[in-house]
Image: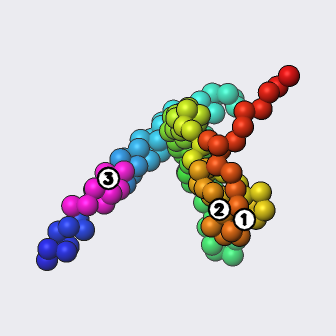
């Protein structure tokens, strides 16, 4: 029972559960936005008649294909994807880029085997070629 308690109380599990709950709620909110706001807007643009995409369907050999409901879900998906991209992915990418720009390089490539090795290494751990650490290289005069 103690192992299960440790598993449940682990930080990542709780954060994941909160994310799923918020995501599900956000999905419902976006679905309502599509049904109550976007669909009437499309109706206003296309001739004043409010389309009800959920009712659009066709029948083949007695099987009903509800492509209108699919359109509602597709629009909701596109809105969710845009919100996630513009409000989460882009800012995080910029933040990580800013943080990484100020970091000093801790690795370099071996000139022989092109493997990543520590910047201060004197010998490549893969091909064993001898190297000069960056801190011991002579300064190059640009003139």
> Which residue is rendered at x = 66% and y = 63% of the image?
124
Tell me: 2 left or right of 41: left
Q: Is residue 133 above or below residue 48?
A: below
Residue 20 appears in which quarter of the rendering? Answer: bottom left
Crowd tier of the residue under label 2, counting other residues whose Cα lies within 10 Å: few below 14, some 14–19, many 20 or above: some
Q: Based on the displayed image, in which of its 4 quarters is residue 40 positioned?
A: top right
Q: Is residue 10 magenta?
A: yes
Which residue bears the numbered disc 2? 123
Residue 3 is situated, as x and y percent measured from the top left of the image, at 19, 74
C-alpha gap between disc 2 and disc 1: 6 Å
Q: Earlier in the sequence, mark 2 or mark 1?
A: 2
**Magenta segment includes 13:** yes
Our reading of the magenta stretch's main secondary structure is helix
Distance Cα–Cα, label 3 vs label 2: 43 Å
Disc with the residue nearer the chain's start (3 vs 1)? 3
Could you tell me which quadrant the C terminus lies in? Answer: top right
**Circle 3: element type:** helix
Residue topped by disc 1? 129
The residue located at (61%, 50%) in the rendering is 119
Q: Is residue 35 visible?
A: no
Return the residue nearer the eye: 78 or 19: 19
Numbered range of the magenta stretch: 9-19
Between 97 and 23, the one nearer to me in the picture: 97
Q: Which residue is mark 3?
A: 15
Q: Is residue 79 above or below residue 70?
A: above
Would residue 31 be visible to someone looking at this image? yes
On the image, the x and y values in percent for residue 22 come to: 35, 47
Q: Earlier in the sequence, mark 3 or mark 2?
A: 3
Percent x, y of residue 18: 31, 51
């Amino acid at each position: 029972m103690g192992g299960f308690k440790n598993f449940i109380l682990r930080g990542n599990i709780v954060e994941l559960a909160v994310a799923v709950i918020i995501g599900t709620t956000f999905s419902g909110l976006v679905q309502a936005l599509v049904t109550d706001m976007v669909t009437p807007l499309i109706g206003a643009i296309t001739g004043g008649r409010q389309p009800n995409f959920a009712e659009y369907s066709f029948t083949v050999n007695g099987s009903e294909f509800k492509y209108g409901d699919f359109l509602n879900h597709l629009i909701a998906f596109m809105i969710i994807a845009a919100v996630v991209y513009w409000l989460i992915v882009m800012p995080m990418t910029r933040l990580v880029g800013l943080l990484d720009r100020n970091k000093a390089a801790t690795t370099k490539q071996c000139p022989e085997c092109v493997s990543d090795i520590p910047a201060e290494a004197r010998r490549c751990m893969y091909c064993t070629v001898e190297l000069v650490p960056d801190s011991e290289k002579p300064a190059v005069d640009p003139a």
